[in-house]
């Protein structure tokens, strides 16, 4: 297969796969933070994930307030996408490595969701603080559980909010731990191209 065909196929699988992973991850995260499911964007996320998620929920039930079916769906999709990209790029992989790579990639992916949701929320709070677009409302609902515990513990600082700085430091620390885990799992830069999220 010519290189340009492989590159185009890689780009399509990575882009479309990342979009659907984002939708499934958002459903899980929005349930976790108890976001407004009457939001039009939430309704779209529910409709887009129901065809795969509802049959899975008949087999895997949630317990301790965790939607295990969504977690299994998220991991399964990531494993399949990673396997597909590895096959396309002639990367030999066994089942254990595939699961490790997918789990690490998925953790990177979720950390990136929080990073970008925070960045967008911060920028919008300066540019258009009164904007009530459904996507922005969801981002605020997603990030507020991170901000609130830190705001409660920080003393008043003249109207300045330093909680995002502390959370960004936390995200950086988590990413460094994930890079160490990626090294232990022998994820080279070439292999990382086949793992969505890294």
Image (cartoon, rainbow, N blue to C red):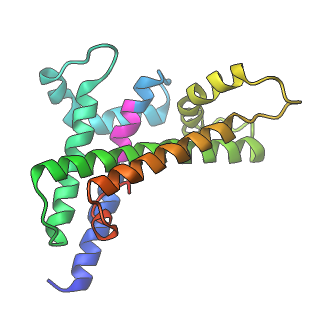
Q: Position of residue 2 (x, y in %)?
A: 18, 86
Q: Quadrant of residue 24?
A: top left
Q: Quadrant of residue 68?
A: top left
118 to the left or right of 126: left
For the question of whether residue 37 can be seen, the reply is no
Q: Position of residue 182 (x, y in %)?
A: 33, 54
- The residue under the point 32% across, 34% down is 47
Q: Nearer the viewer, residue 67 or 23?
A: 67
* Callout count: 0
- The residue under the point 34% across, 49% down is 181
- The residue under the point 22% across, 80% down is 5
Q: Quadrant of residue 166?
A: top right
Q: Position of residue 144 (x, y in %)?
A: 60, 28
Which contiguous range is marked in magenta? Answer: 21-28
Q: Nearer the viewer, residue 59 or 160?
A: 160
Q: Nearer the viewer, residue 181 or 156?
A: 181
Q: Position of residue 95 (x, y in %)?
A: 11, 50
Q: Farthest residue in the bottom direction?
A: 2
Q: Quadrant of the N terminus?
A: bottom left
24 to the left or right of 87: right
- The residue under the point 76% across, 48% down is 127
Q: Farthest residue in the top direction?
A: 64
For the question of whether residue 65 can be seen, the reply is yes
**Which secondary structure type mostly characterizes the magenta part of the structure?**
helix
User: Quick check: 84 above or below 25?
Assistant: below
Q: Quadrant of the C terminus?
A: bottom left
Residue 2 part of the magenta segment: no
């Amino acid at each position: 297969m010519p290189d340009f065909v492989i590159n185009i196929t890689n780009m399509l699988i990575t882009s479309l796969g990342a979009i659907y992973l984002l939708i499934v991850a958002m459903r899980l995260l929005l349930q976790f933070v108890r976001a407004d499911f009457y939001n039009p964007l939430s309704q779209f996320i529910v409709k887009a994930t129901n065809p795969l998620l509802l049959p899975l929920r008949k087999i895997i039930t949630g317990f301790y307030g965790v939607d295990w079916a969504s977690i299994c769906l998220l991991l399964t999709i990531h494993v399949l996408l990673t396997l597909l990209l590895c096959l396309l790029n002639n990367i030999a992989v066994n089942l254990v490595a595939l699961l490790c790579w997918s789990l690490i990639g998925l953790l990177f992916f979720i950390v990136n969701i929080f990073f970008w949701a925070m960045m967008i929320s911060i920028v919008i709070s300066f540019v258009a603080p009164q904007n009530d677009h459904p996507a922005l409302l969801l981002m605020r609902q997603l990030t507020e559980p991170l901000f609130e515990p830190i705001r409660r513990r920080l003393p008043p600082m003249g109207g300045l909010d330093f909680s995002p700085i502390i959370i960004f430091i936390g995200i950086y620390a988590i990413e460094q731990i994930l890079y160490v885990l990626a090294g232990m799992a022998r994820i080279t830069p070439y292999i990382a191209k086949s793992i969505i999220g890294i």
